[in-house]
Image (tube, rainbow, N blue to C red):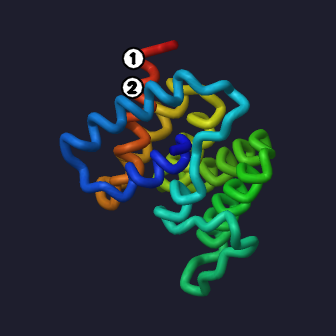
Amino acid sequence: MSIQEKLTSLLSLEIGPEVRTLVSSVGSDISALPRDISIIPTFAFKVVGIDPEKKHFEDNALSEKEYFYFEKCLNASVAFFATQTEDAIHLLMQAKWDFNDWALAHYLLGLVMLENREFKSALDQFDQALELEPFNTKPMRIFREIAHFLVMHPS
C-alpha cells in the first residue's frame, strides 16, 4: 500500500487509539521515503472542500475578497499537484495575507510543507489552523499528529 493510500485510509477513520498507532506507522514510513516520492494524496485537499481537479472555484454567496481567498487556495492546490510547489506556497501566503484568521490556507500550507519534508513548518501551520478552526478538524488533527511525530523522531 502506498503512503498516499495509507493517508487516505487514515483520514477515513474515526479519531481514537487506532489512529494514533497508524499515525506512528505512517510517520515512520514517511521518514524512510526518498524526498522525490510524493506523500500527500488528493483526498487531503478534497476533504476540506478543495478539489485540485477543478480549475475554477464557484460560489456566488461570497464577497469579492472572500472569493479571491478561496480561488487562491484552489489555484495553490492545482499548482501543488502540478509540482509547482513554489507557486503553491506563494498563493497560500497571499491568501493568508488576505485572511490570516481563516484556517484553510494554514492547513493547505501545512500540507505543502509536509510534502517538502519541512516538518516543523508543517506542524506550525497545522497548529495555527487548529487554533483558528476548532470544528471540522479531523484532517488537520491527523496531519498535525503526523508532523509532530516527524519533528519528534527525525530520521
CB atoms of marks 1 and 2 within 8 Å: yes
Percent of width and height locating residue 87: 79, 46
- Report the front residue among 97 and 59: 59
Residue lying furthest bottom: 60
Q: At label 1, which amino acid type do we have?
A: Met
Q: Disc 1 and disc 2: Cα gap in Å? A: 5 Å
Q: In the drawing, what numbered circle is on residue 122?
A: none
Disc 2: CA contacts within 10 A as few (<14), some (14-19) or many (>=20): many
Q: Residue at x 73, y 75 (%)?
A: 56
- Report the front residue among 64 and 43: 43
Percent of width and height locating residue 32: 55, 22
Q: At label 2, which amino acid type do we have?
A: Phe
Residue lying furthest front: 1
Taking the image as shown, residue 79 lies to the left or right of residue 133, namely right
Q: In the drawing, what numbered circle is on residue 149?
A: 2
Percent of width and height locating residue 155: 51, 13
Q: Residue at x 49, y 38 (%)?
A: 125
Image vertical order of residue 74 relative to residue 76, above or below:
below
Disc 1: CA contacts within 10 A as few (<14), some (14-19) or many (>=20): few
Q: In the drawing, what numbered circle is on residue 152?
A: 1
